[in-house]
Amino acid sequence: MTARARRLLRVIDVTFPLILLLAFTSWSPVGPERASVTAVHAGAHTLAGTAEGRLFALEDQNQWSETATLAGPVTEIAEGSGETWVRAGDSLYRSGVLVLRDVRSFALSPSNVQVVYAATSNAILFSSDGGTSWSERAGGAMSIDVDAADSAIVWAVRTNGVVEKSTDAGVTWVAMPMGGAVERIDAHPRRSGTAFAIGANGLGFRTTDGQRWTLLYYLTGRLTFDPRRDDHFFAVDSAGRLFHSDDDGDWLDVVHGGPILSLSFSGDGSLLAGFREDGVMRSDDGGNTWSPDRRGLLAAQIHSLAASAGGAVAYAGSVSSMFRTTNRGATWDPVFTLRLLPGPFSAIAIDATDPNRVWIAAGISAWFSGDGGVRFNRLFWAPDREPQTIVDVAIDPLDSRAVYVLMSQSLFRLNTEPLQLTELTPPGGPFETMAVDGGSIWVGGPRLLHSTDGGRTWIDRSPLAAGSITALHAFRGGVVAGTSSGHVIFNGVTAHLGSGAIKDIASDGTTIYVAAGDIYASTDGAHWQNATPLTDVTTLTSGSLRMAGTAGWGVWVGTKRDSRRRAVTPQYPRSTASGFRR
């Protein structure tokens, strides 16, 4: 039996009644249509690659369609001789087929589409037949590029930061005289003999004859050359800021603060940029202003998720943006963005009686909104507790004017009317999760701690199952606990759902749902069923709206089906490169 077949047949206990467990088995992606686009390319096709290794193509209807899932973040895309070349992680793909590993850089010759160079840690590889066969040249490199007119002229930045040049397709090499170490080499795509060497601390070098190099100040990042003007290029630095030069690099000006991860010119002369968490954006004024171009681009990393009790409103927190939906995921709007990226957004808490009252947290800060996310005010900030970060927040169900804030080594109760902060830190950190129900506070970490007097005293209720407590959820007057070893404990009963850690636990009042890679369900904590084969689930919502946040696949919503009338067919995320994931 294949691993895929075993996955489809895997169950925990088939004796449990299926009519409840299969109530939410059809899952559909709903957004937000955002992604960290780490590579964008506009050529014969417009392509975008994400930090999760997903490759998208822009279709005729101006919609993004996923074409492949690759092994690692997509960092470079190029097209030549009818082939699409992609570097993802340390692997190089040609039209979706893996051709090389341990690749640190690659380059296609502008003058001969059959010539390809690839730099690895230990060698430079050369192909004269479009990547079908390869010859090995001694010595590794971290960056490589080819002359505009002569495919035998190639520059390489060795691992020690020295630039070398070859005029015989890498057989012999000559070191280039530089005034400092270099990190990257970019050859001009139309000017033979012209190349730019980017060093550290904003220092760079330029050659126009392939021999003599001129020192340039403020040269930084990966260069993108304007197809209409030979002396004009853009650069994106490591912080995501966009620069441009209109004098061959003698001076660079800041155009936009980003954060931009990748850049390309489109056929009509506009700029396409891959933003961190904002997908692909387009600029028609040289990068000063940007408009979204991300329909169908679903690749957001969801770190926190919460829905109102009736399901009318839901919030999803990613690396640097907080999104809100008021129509069960049909559309999402960003309501808050982190400027200094202390995130990711680790926790969300919605008032059970008023969905307009919501708390969100990232880093050492927690913000409150009383108007449904129109305005957020920071009411909690703990710089004296760094490097601790907030791991959970919970509104007191007995007094919605109070919120509990759990940090990795601290616990606080914040009363907002009047504003008062009280520390309730129990012994036994670090902490990972919390649940508050009536007069009970539960805190999980290496131990499971319980307080019934508002945090003044604590009782150790650690279970016997191996692993620390990674998820807690209040249910039917008790608490459901998940551990780092894949155990779930409820009412003294322990079930083992797999070797991975339990990421989150939620419920709809009758059924418990657990995120443990897949989503499992139970009504009693003793008998469990794999409720969906959706993978990479990181967080779940409680209440009537069933949503799942994923690590790089956005938010999915569960659709209720009547299992008494028809069979349920599991739905998998699709990938033309790797088939079913895992």
Image (spheres, grey):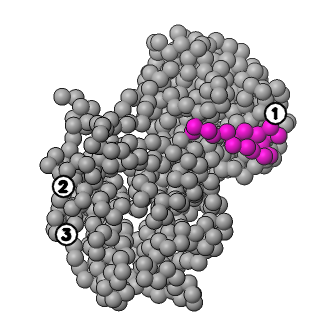
Residues in magenta, as a range? 281-297
Q: Determine whether the residue tagged by mark 2 lies in a helix, strand or loop.
A: loop
Q: Main secondary structure of the magenta part?
A: loop
- Kindly identify which residue carries mark 3: 491
Left or right of 581? Residue 379 is right
Left or right of 410? Residue 290 is right
Q: CA distance from mark 1 to mark 2?
A: 65 Å
Please name the residue shown 34% across and 61% down the image.
507
Residue 501 % position (x, y): 30, 56
Extreme-front residue of the structure: 565
- Kindly identify which residue carries mark 1: 232
Q: CA distance from mark 3 to mark 2?
A: 13 Å
Visible in this render: residue 388?
no
Q: Is residue 470 above or below residue 158?
A: below
- Reading the chain from its start, which is encountered first: label 3 or label 2? 3
Going by the numbered disc 2, the residue's amino acid type is His
Q: Quadrant of the N terminus?
A: top left
Please name the residue shown 36% across and 44% down the image.
561
Q: 428 or 130, which is in the foreground?
A: 428
Going by the numbered disc 3, the residue's amino acid type is Asn
Q: Is residue 275 above or below residue 485?
A: above
Q: CA distance from mark 1 to mark 3?
A: 68 Å
Q: 111 or 491, which is in the foreground?
A: 491
- Kindly identify which residue carries mark 2: 527
Residue 233 % position (x, y): 77, 35
